[in-house]
Image: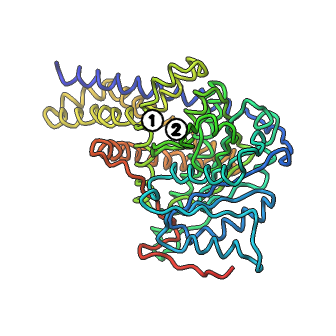
Amino acid sequence: MSVKVLLAITQAFALTMSVAFLVYVVVIVVPYLRRKPGPVGDPADFTWHFFVPCRDEQVVIRDTIRYLRTTFRKAHVWVVDDDSEDRTARVVRMLWRRHGGYDPYLHLVPRVRPEARTGKGDALNAAYRALNDWMGPDAARDDVVVVVVDADGRPAPNCLEVCAARHLFGDPEVGAVQLDVWMSNVETPPPTRNPVGRWFGLKLAQLQDLEFRTAIAAIQTSRGFTGTISMGGNGQFTRLTALDSIAGGTEEPWRGSLLEDFELGVHLLTAGWRTGFTPDSHVAQEGLYSLRRFLVQRTRWGQGTMQCARYLRRIWDSPHVTTLGAAEMMYYLAQPWLQLLGSLLYPIPFLLLVVSTAGDPAQMWTWFTEGAWILFAIYGSFGLLPFLVWGPIYQLKCLRSKNILRGIGMGFAYAAYIYTFYVTSWRALFRLVRGRNGWAKTRRNTEQATGAKVALDA
C-alpha cells in the first residue's frame, strides 16, 4: 500500500470522526440557544439539606458555612469532615457555638480512618446516614431535598425557588436536578508576581467557565430530550426518597466510582426517576489556576468515566431508559476511549506527510499543491470548528459582550484547552491499568504546599 493511499485512508477515517462530532455540536447548540427561562416555585414546599463534604478545607469552609447559613436560613447544613489533617472540624465547631449558643441548622459529621478518606461518595453516604438518624424513622421524607455543595461552592440565592418549580421538584417523578456551574474567579488573577503566570492562570479559569456555561450546559440541555440529564459533583439536588430508592440495606446511594455524581445519575435513571437541569440558577466554584492541578482533576474525571463503563449493560437493559437515551449515555461513556483512539489517528496524516516529504520533496509538493492541500484544510477545519464555536457563544450569551474578535480568540484557546483531554485520557488509562483507583483531592488555589493557616475566630 502506497503512502498516499494510507494517508488518504487515515485522513478519511479521522475526518469522519470529526464530521460526526461537528454534527453533534450543531444538534446541541440549537436547543441551548433557543431555551427560555422557566417559572419558579415556592421553596417553603420543601425542606432543604446541604451536604458539604470536606477533606482539609480549613481555608474555605468558614466562608462557605456563613454564606449558606445567611443565604438559606431555613436550610440545614451538614459538613462532613473526612478525617481532615488540618483544622476543618474545629472551624465548624466554632461556628456551631456562635454567639454563645448552638446553631440547630448546622451539623458536623466526623469521620475517622480507616473508614474515612476513601472517596467523596463515601463521605456523602455518611451524611445520608447521619440525616436518617437525625430525622428518625417516622419523619416525612417526600418533601426533603438533599443538596451537594463543594467546600468552595456558592449556590445562587435563587436556587431553591428555581428548583422548587413545577417542572422540577414540583413534579413528583423528578428525582434530581443539576444546577448550571460557573467559575467565581474569572476576573481575579492568581496572586503571583509573574505576569505570564497571572495571565495563564486567569485564562485557564475563564476557559473552565466557558466549558461549563456553554458546552456542558448545551449537552445537559439536549439531554432533556433523551431523558439522560446527568448529575454534577457541585450544585446537585436530589430528592431524599430518590436516594432511599437506590440506597439499599447498606444506606449507600453513592457508589465507589471516582465519578460518583454521574454514577448516582445512572442509578436514579435506571430506577425510574427523571432528572432535570436548569441554567436559570447556578452554583459558583473556584476555577483552577494551575495546569498541573487541572490535569490531575481531569484525569480523575476521565478515570471515573472509564470505571462507569461497567454500567452499560444496566443502562441498555433498563426499561426506564429509551434506546436514544441509552445511545447518548453510551456516547458519553465512550468519550475517553474515543480520545485515546483520536490521539493515535489524528496525527497520522501529518506524520506521513512529513516522512513522505523528507523522502521525495518534489513529488509530495506536486501532490500537495495539485489539490491535496484542500483535504488537509478540510481536515483541520472540521477538527477545530466544534470547539471554536463556543468562544463567540460564550462572549455573546454568557458575558453579554459583542466583542466577537475576543470571542473568536477564546474559541481558539478553548480548542487548545480541549486537546489537554487527550493527555488526561492516557493518564487515566495508565492509572486504571495499574489499579490506582484512589480518590485524590485537588488543592484549592489558596492552599500552599505546606498547608494554609486561617484565623479561627468566629
The residue at 61%/58% (across/down) is 52
The residue at 46%/44% (across/down) is 256
Looking at the image, residue 40 lies above or below residue 70:
above
Looking at the picture, which amino acid does disc 2 mark?
Answer: Glu
Question: Do the residues under discs 2 and 1 have CB atoms within 8 angstroms?
Answer: yes
Residue 199 seen in this snapshot = no
Please state if 231 lies on the left or on the right of 36 as rendered. Answer: left
**Image coordinates for residue 412, horizontal then vertical, percent:** 49, 46
Please state if 164 lies on the left or on the right of 153 as rendered. Answer: right
The residue at 42%/49% (across/down) is 300
Distance between mark 2 and mark 1 Cα atoms? 7 Å
Residue 319 seen in this snapshot = yes
Kindly identify which residue carries mark 2. Answer: 263
Looking at the image, residue 75 lies above or below residue 20:
below
**Image coordinates for residue 442, horizontal then vertical, percent:** 46, 59
Crowding near pointer 2: few (<14 within 10 Å), some, many (20+)? Answer: many
> In front: 176, or 101?
101
Point out which mark residue 308 bears: 1
Please state if 390 lies on the left or on the right of 381 as rendered. Answer: right
Farthest residue in the front direction? 137
Looking at the image, residue 369 lies above or below residue 240:
above
**Image coordinates for residue 440, horizontal then vertical, percent:** 42, 56
Looking at the picture, which amino acid does disc 1 mark?
Answer: Cys
Quadrant in the rendering for residue 69: bottom right
- Image quarter hosting the N terminus: top left
> In front: 134, or 88?
134
Q: In what element is the residue under mark 1?
A: helix
